[in-house]
Image (tube, grey):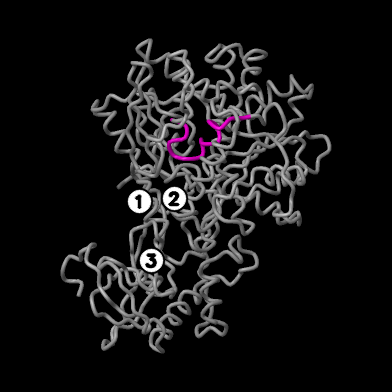
Amino acid sequence: MGHHASDPNKIVNITIDGVPVSCPETTLILDAAKMAGIDIPVLCYHPDLKVRATCRLCVVELKGQKKLKTACSNEVWDGAEFITNSPAVRQARKDVLELILAEHPQDCLQCVRNTNCELQQLARDFGVSKPLFANQPKQIPIEDSNGVIVRDMAKCVKCGRCVEMCQEVQTVGAINTAQRSVEYEVTTAFDRPLQDSTCIYCGQCIAVCPVGALYEKDDTEKVWQALGDSDKHVIVQVAPAVRVALGEEFGLEPGSITTGKMVAALRRLGFDKVFDTDFAADVTIMEEGNELLERMSHGGTLPLITSCSPGWINFVETFYPDLLDNVSTCKSPQQMFGALAKSYYPEKAGIDAAKIVSVSIMPCTAKKYESARLEMNSSGYRDVDIVLTTRELARMVKQAGFDFNKLSNAEFDAPLGISTGAAVIFGTSGGVMEAALRTVYEVVTGKELANVDFEGVRGFTGVKEAEVDLDGKKVKVAIANGLKNARVILDKIRAGECDYQFVEIMCCPGGCIGGGGQPWGTTQATKEARMAGLYQADRELSIRQSHKNPAVKALYDEFLGKPLSHKSHELLHTHYHPRHKQISREPGY
């Protein structure tokens, strides 16, 4: 009973609340209960993270034993009989909830997670109405000084999910647990503000927080003000991963492609032009693909590493500054779009660039940090003025009061709304690589690709390697998603142990589809559905290669000249710098 190593091939028979279940011996009690149609409540457990079993909400009774067992951390064994709904179990769960709620601020109506909060849901399910204990929330000031992530630690339920994500999955180590007993808390080193830690603003901590303790800085009010100012020309760009996730906020299945409704919603909110970040993704491929060929033919630093993910850029600047020469000088599609929106677009549309407010909708919290970087103003203005997450856009739609699901499909505006299938897959791990290969192949060989699908670079595997044959010229590529996986490739490059020419790194597990600004409750299954949605959107587009985008061709003919031209270097490229880890030591330690 838990003393031997369990065998995944051995099927055991158990009963849960009298329902017989047959399952592999390695099954958690929690998952076995699901097979019997029983949902055991959890708070600290998350399907994508290592089990910590700290909250004790998931306890169950074992027939013939007094001591309750946690369902999230114990596997089943043959002949076991579990009871998930006995008086003792119900009382134990209620006690746990009451203790958490005794310390928890009772300001649900003001909270960003109201109606979408795991603690609130549990309290509702358990009928906790008259608390046993007096409510004594901790007085902890809200930290919102970094402009990206807000920490309201009075609401923290100490489940440890954010720490697990930051330490084990992303290996950033900006936050950890400290103290013991009633003083136990989640904090940064020396209790410094987040911007004085190694935080890279990926927002993966926000993505797994069950309550309103962590969330993005809300910039919707700035957008409402801009939209209400008749003197401003307000334009918006939308990242590829948003169109397969936004529908979840309005009750649709994950992965539903809502591009047309999303465009209609943005028009309804009052944006003067609704453009697509995908247009700039096609431009990114032109620049980055040519940068790769340039480096390969002129002995430049290889492998070339993609620069589309701002969380990854913050990470390489912090932890691997010695590899900055490997990073592409290309700005991310968001920032390329911003630079063109205040140079090419006003020239073409006959609008004063000073009147343009450029808004972006991103699946990402690190994009807020990126848009505020000092380097991002090559147009003479700030490239991107305001960044909203997918969640913030959903909030605006709800505030505006129209029914998202009843909107008719609308089309993006030209020219910065015209894009290809290569651009839409930028939102998933492997997508930037595949988009680049679709173009680089034809540039190198001068031949049409018979099949534009590079299946070998797709999927969720943490580190993927592939070799691509460019008509006799072999190119070795690697792809990593999630920063622990990125370290594997970066350590190889640092040690001179790999012969890759091109590496794609996405900061978030699964890529942008799993970004820190995506709808709450995201799991691996949600990401898989979103990924499938992006590949479907790619298949449905008539043009699937960046260099065949007519609007991109026009951009080069009319404005930039050619990829890597002087003008494109000025507007579309940048340099990254080492970020000093400020937390090395306190003076006197």
Label 2, residues with CA under 10 Å away: few <14, some 14-19, many ≥20? few
Question: Residue at 38% of width from left, 19% of height from top?
Answer: 470
Give the mark nearest the N terminus, 1 or 3: 1
Q: What residue type is labelled 1?
A: Gln
- Distance from Cα at disc 1 to Cα at disc 3: 17 Å
Label 3, residues with CA under 10 Å away: few <14, some 14-19, many ≥20? few
Q: Do the residues labelled 3 and 2 touch (CB within 8 Å)?
A: no
Q: Position of residue 356 (x, y in %)?
A: 74, 31
Give the mark nearest the N terminus, 1 or 2: 1
Q: How many marks?
A: 3
Q: Main secondary structure of the magenta part?
A: helix
Nearer to us of marks 1 and 3 is 1
- The residue at which mark 1 appears reads as 167
**For the residue labelled by badge 1, is the local secondary structure a helix, a strand or a loop?**
helix
Up the image or down, 325 lies above or below 223; here it is above
Q: Which amino acid does label 3 sit on?
A: Tyr
**For the residue labelled by badge 2, is the local secondary structure a helix, a strand or a loop?**
loop
Res 305 quadrant in image: top left
Q: Are marks 1 and 2 in contact (CB under 8 Å)?
A: no
Q: Quadrant of the N terminus?
A: bottom left
Query: Which numbered dot is residue 184?
Result: 3
- The residue at which mark 2 appears reads as 192
Q: Which amino acid does label 2 sit on?
A: Arg
